[in-house]
Each structure stands twice: as C-alpha cells, then as structure tokens.
Image: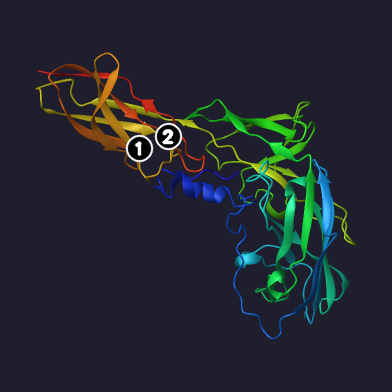
C-alpha cells in the first residue's frame, strides 16, 4: 500500500495534492470536466479511416446490480498494422490498453447516484473479424443501471508499432457519435460514513461503514461484493482488484481505514460479461465512494512566564496537531490566544499563524490581575467535504499581571 505523504511538509500542495493522487477522476459529478485527458493530434494522411461506429442495441434496460450488455463495433479501413494489444496508453503513459473507446454520458446522471456513478467508461476493443489492415473491432460492455441516461462513443484510440497511437479521434466529430440510451430501474445507492466521528488526528484507524440499498424499495442489498483499495489505479478501467467487502443480510458493510494512507476508494463493479470470440471483457464501474472523515485536531500551548508586570509581553508558544488533514480556504491554519472574561466568555487577545512544522508563537500583553488563557483553533470547513476539522482548544493556563 502506498504511504500517505506528509501533507504538512509539502505545504500546502497539502491535502488537495494528496487527494489529487488518490482520487483519479473515475466518477466525476455530472457536468464536470473530462475525466480522461485526450491528447491533441493532427491526423496524418496515412492514418486509418473510420468506416463506421455503432452500439447495439441502441436502447437497453438494466435493473439493480444486474447489468445489461451492449456491443460497441468499430470498422476501420486502411488501418496498417494495428495491434490488438500494445505497450502504449492514452496521454503518453505506459500500459497495455491497446485499442479502446471511451463511452461518455451526454446528459445528467440520475440525482440518486450523481457524483457516485461514472460519467465516463473506458472499454477495450479487440479485433473480431478481418485483419489489422481492414477489420472490425469489438467491445462487449456491461452496462449497469446507474448508467441511466444517454451515452455516446466519445473517443477512439488504436495503436500499431509506434509508441504514438496512429488513430486518436472523437467519432462524433466525424459523423459517428454512436449514441445509446440506458433505462435504469431499481438503481443501487451506496452510503458511507465514519466511526468514530470525528476521528482523532493521531488515530491509526477508523471504521468506514455504510449500506448498499435499492433506491426503489429502500431494502438493503445482501451478499454483494465491494472492493476497496488505496492504490491510485484502484481498479480503474476494468481492473477488479482490491480488498473484498461483502454486504450483510441487511446490506450493511464496514472496513477499517488507516488514515495515514491515501484515502481508500470503495467500488462496486459489474460482473464480467461474455465477450465475442475471446472469453471475457472488462468489468464496468457501478458506484464508487470514498470516506471523508472529520478530524479532531489538538492544540498544546504554554506561556514563557506566568507572573509578569502588567502590560509586559508574554510569549505563548505551542504546537498544532492535525497530521495535515485540516484544509480551509487559505493555505495556513491560525490559532487564537484567548482570555476568559467573566465566567464563560472567551475573548481573543492575539492570533498566531501555524508554521509548516505545526509550531506557533505569539506575544500577548499581560493584563493586570490573574487571568485564565487558552489557545483555540476555530476548525476548518474543508473543501468539497475534504479536510473538515472540528474546533480544538488547549488546556488552560494562568498569567498574572502585577
């Protein structure tokens, strides 16, 4: 498992940077930008020509966690020596994608699963008739009910001997959008929470838990296998790896998370579907969730003197502990030195910025008399649910101004 970076030390590529690694965009919210980056390329005269792209049937119905099946067919002419598999991958990354298509949603996802069901799915193509020069390439795709809506073939890539794919095109731009419609019934929904809530900053584990249920009936879906993993790949685009979690008789599940690791992703996949002429095809993503724990940080502080002349400066120094998990609208945390006015009112005497080490110090003028002080952290609202921290205070200390 990949060790979690010390996000405080990389300040503040921070929590956002850590999450960017952990949460490669498999299921962006409806209307979000492209989940898979397609490199621009000017077609060459020797490039293969797309004869036809189709999806059959054009309308399918899927229910619950049982997928329907569509077949994507691509006919290429003058394709040269295109390969069924090769050592290239989209964006110049190494891999073994071979020829593939991206299927992309063109309308809004059902609100019951929006943000957790995928808006794009990469499917591998295989040569099923003809030759690499002129042939028919096919993908047999498992279509879950959470894909309800209209989709099309958004992107097509095929490769030969060159490390640069000889064919990269959006079929819709050349008159082959190949739309298809998914009618979804009994859509599954996957909830997720954490226990305890909030999680202590120095905890070595917490419980991620939730329920898989049928949105039409409200009943839990028992005996369904989920997969969770910390790896950045995490089963994207057909992988079926990770740690299994099986829902109980009422659809509930739980697993232990190490907060020091990259945030885990919990996936529900379709089963593999029979494929034309070559065994099985990749699975498709049904739903995905990632826990967003609320953190309870800690503050330690003490003055450099407890009795000084009234009006003299007292240096209050200490340390803020959050393991880099608190994220606000600014890139640094701040803490307030407060004194107790009356029986319950705390008033701020000074504010200090927390350094990258977590340490802080600030000079506070001593008030005449005996006063109780503390250092308080107001909490952070987080960003899109990430980096939420509850308020925290230090133990009280007393400073007397003579």
Q: Which residue is mark 2?
A: 322
Q: Which residue is mark 1?
A: 358
Residue 97 in sight in this render: no
Disc 2 on helix, strand or loop?
loop
> Viewer-proximal residue, 103 or 38?
103
Residue 350 in sight in this render: yes
Circle 1 crowding by C-alpha within 10 Å: few under 14, some 14–19, many from 20: some
Q: Residue 353 in the image: x percent, y percent? A: 29, 39
- Residue 39 in the figure: left or right of residue 313: right
Looking at the rendered image, the quarter that the N terminus falls into is: top right
Q: Going 85% across and 52% down the picture, which residue do you hit? A: 273
The answer to which of marks 1 and 2 sits earlier in the sequence is: 2
How far apart marks 1 and 2 lie (CA) works out to 8 Å
* Residues marked 1 and 2 touching at CB (< 8 Å): yes
Q: Residue 373 in the image: x percent, y percent? A: 25, 21
Q: Going 67% across and 49% down the picture, which residue do you hit? A: 109
> Viewer-proximal residue, 172 or 246?
172
């Amino acid at each position: 498992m990949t060790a979690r970076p010390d996000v405080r030390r990389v300040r503040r590529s921070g929590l956002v940077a850590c999450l960017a690694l952990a949460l490669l965009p498999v299921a962006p919210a409806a209307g979000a930008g492209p989940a898979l980056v397609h490199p621009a390329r000017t077609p060459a005269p020797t490039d293969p020509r797309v004869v036809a792209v189709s999806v059959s049937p054009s309308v399918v119905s899927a229910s619950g966690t049982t997928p329907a099946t569509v077949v994507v067919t691509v006919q290429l002419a003058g394709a040269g020596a295109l390969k069924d598999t090769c050592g290239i991958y989209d964006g110049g990354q190494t891999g073994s994608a071979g020829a593939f298509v991206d299927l992309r949603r063109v309308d809004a996802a059902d609100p019951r699963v929006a943000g957790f069901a995928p808006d794009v799915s990469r499917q591998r193509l295989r040569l099923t008739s003809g030759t690499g020069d002129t042939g028919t390439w096919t993908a047999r795709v498992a279509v879950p009910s959470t894909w309800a809506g209209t989709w099309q073939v958004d992107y097509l890539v095929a490769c030969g001997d060159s490390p640069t794919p000889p064919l990269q095109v959006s079929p819709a731009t050349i008159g082959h959008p190949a739309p298809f419609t998914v009618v979804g019934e009994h859509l599954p929904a996957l909830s997720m929470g954490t226990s305890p809530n909030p999680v202590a900053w120095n905890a070595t584990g917490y419980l991620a838990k939730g329920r898989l249920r049928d949105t039409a009936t409200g009943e839990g879906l028992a005996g369904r296998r989920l997969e969770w993993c910390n790896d950045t790949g995490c089963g994207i685009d057909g992988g079926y790896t990770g740690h299994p979690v099986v829902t109980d008789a009422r659809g509930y599940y739980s697993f232990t998370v190490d907060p020091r690791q990259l945030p885990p992703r919990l996936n529900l996949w379709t089963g593999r579907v029979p494929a034309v002429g070559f065994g099985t095809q990749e699975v498709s993503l049904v739903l995905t969730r990632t826990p967003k724990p609320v953190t309870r940080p800690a503050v330690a502080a003490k003055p450099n003197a407890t009795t000084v002349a009234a009006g003299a400066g007292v240096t209050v120094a200490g340390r803020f502990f959050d393991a880099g998990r608190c994220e606000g609208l600014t890139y640094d945390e701040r803490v307030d030195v407060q004194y107790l006015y009356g029986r319950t009112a705390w008033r701020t005497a000074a504010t200090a910025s927390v350094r990258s080490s977590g340490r802080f110090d600030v000079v506070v003028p001593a008030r005449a008399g005996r006063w109780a002080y503390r250092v308080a952290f107001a909490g952070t609202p987080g960003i899109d649910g990430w980096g939420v921290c509850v308020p925290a205070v230090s133990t009280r200390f007393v400073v007397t101004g003579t």
